[in-house]
Image (cartoon, rainbow, N blue to C red):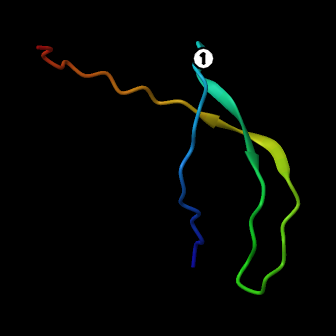
């Protein structure tokens, strides 16, 4: 059984294809607090759309 975290992410404007990812302030179901983890990055998959203005 795979566990999947879901949540919101706010990313600053960047020209790169990845951004640093820091996971912090989380607890498991037993109430154990996890340590901050910044050893990963998150790929950016841009979505481009054609929106009519006006």
**At which x and y percent is residue 47?**
35, 27
Q: Picture quarter containing residue 39?
A: top right
**At which x and y percent is residue 11?**
59, 32
Q: Quadrant of the C terminus?
A: top left
Residue at which label 1 appears: 14
Asked which secondary structure carries label 1, the reply is: loop
Q: Measured along the vertical axis of the image, is residue 18 above or below residue 30?
A: above
Q: Residues within 10 Å of mark 1 (few under 14, many from 20)?
A: few
Residue at position x 77%, y 87% in the image: 30
Nearest the eye: 13 or 46: 13
Q: Quadrant of the N terminus?
A: bottom right
Tally of numbered discs: 1
**At which x and y percent is residue 4?**
57, 66
**At which x and y percent is residue 24?**
78, 55
Nearest the eye: 40 or 51: 51
Q: Taking 29 as reference, is 54 left or right?
A: left
Residue at the far front: name it: 54
Q: Measured along the vertical axis of the image, is residue 8 above or below residue 11?
A: below
Q: Picture quarter containing residue 18?
A: top right
Q: Measured along the vertical axis of the image, is residue 16 above or below residue 44?
A: above
Residue at position x 74%, y 77% in the image: 28
Residue at position x 54%, y 56% in the image: 7
């Amino acid at each position: 059984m795979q566990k999947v975290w879901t949540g919101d992410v706010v990313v600053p404007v960047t020209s790169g294809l990845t951004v640093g990812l820091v996971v912090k302030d989380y607890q498991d179901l037993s109430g154990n607090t996890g340590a901050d983890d910044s050893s990963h990055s998150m790929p950016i998959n841009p979505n481009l759309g054609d929106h009519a203005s006006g």
